[in-house]
Amino acid sequence: MNDFSELAIILGTFILDLAPALAAGCLLGVFFFTGLWWTVRKLGSIKRVALWFLGSLLLRTSIVLLGFYFFLGDSWQHLLMGMLGFIIARSIILRYIRIVGQSNAPSEKAGHAS
């Protein structure tokens, strides 16, 4: 075989086998980190903060662990790609939260006299 056909086989294997694992990891990460963001935003209006936070943590962690076990637990390559997707989702969610936080923040010059 030549180098091009070997590369095509490797790329085809990645797309058909590992890309769904990457996508599943991304979805699990989006679920986990948006759930965390939503929980933290709700904490100011809840009376039992510790119970709410602990319940949210247990629910989010359980769902993510079950997702990793059932969807990605058949090989180390799938787990690795799932973790990569989870980390990518974390980066995307953090960037989104910063953008939303900056657009909702009051301007620094708003309260100052000119």
Image (spheres, rainbow, N blue to C red):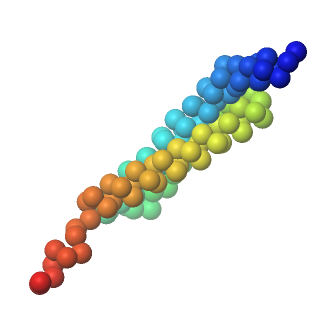
The image quadrant of residue 26 is top right
Give whichever of 59, 48 is nearer the camera: 59
Give whichever of 92, 72 is nearer the camera: 92
Question: Is residue 108 left or right of 60 when viewed as pictured?
Answer: left
Q: Is residue 34 above or below residue 26?
A: below
Q: Is residue 55 above or below residue 49?
A: above
Image point 48% across, 41% down: which residue?
Answer: 30
Question: Is residue 69 left or right of 25 when viewed as pictured?
Answer: right
The residue most toward the right is 1
The residue most toward the bottom is 113
Image point 32% across, 54% down: which residue?
Answer: 100
> Dividing the image into 4 quarters, which one contains the C terminus?
bottom left
Instruction: Say if residue 99 shows up in the picture.
Output: yes
Image point 71% across, 24% down: which residue?
Answer: 11
In this rendering, the count of numbered labels is 0
Give how far across and how far down residue 83 sits, in percent.
65, 42
Q: Is residue 81 above or below residue 9?
A: below
Q: Is residue 29 above or below residue 54?
A: above
Image point 33% across, 59% down: which residue?
Answer: 101
The image quadrant of residue 79 is top right
The image quadrant of residue 1 is top right
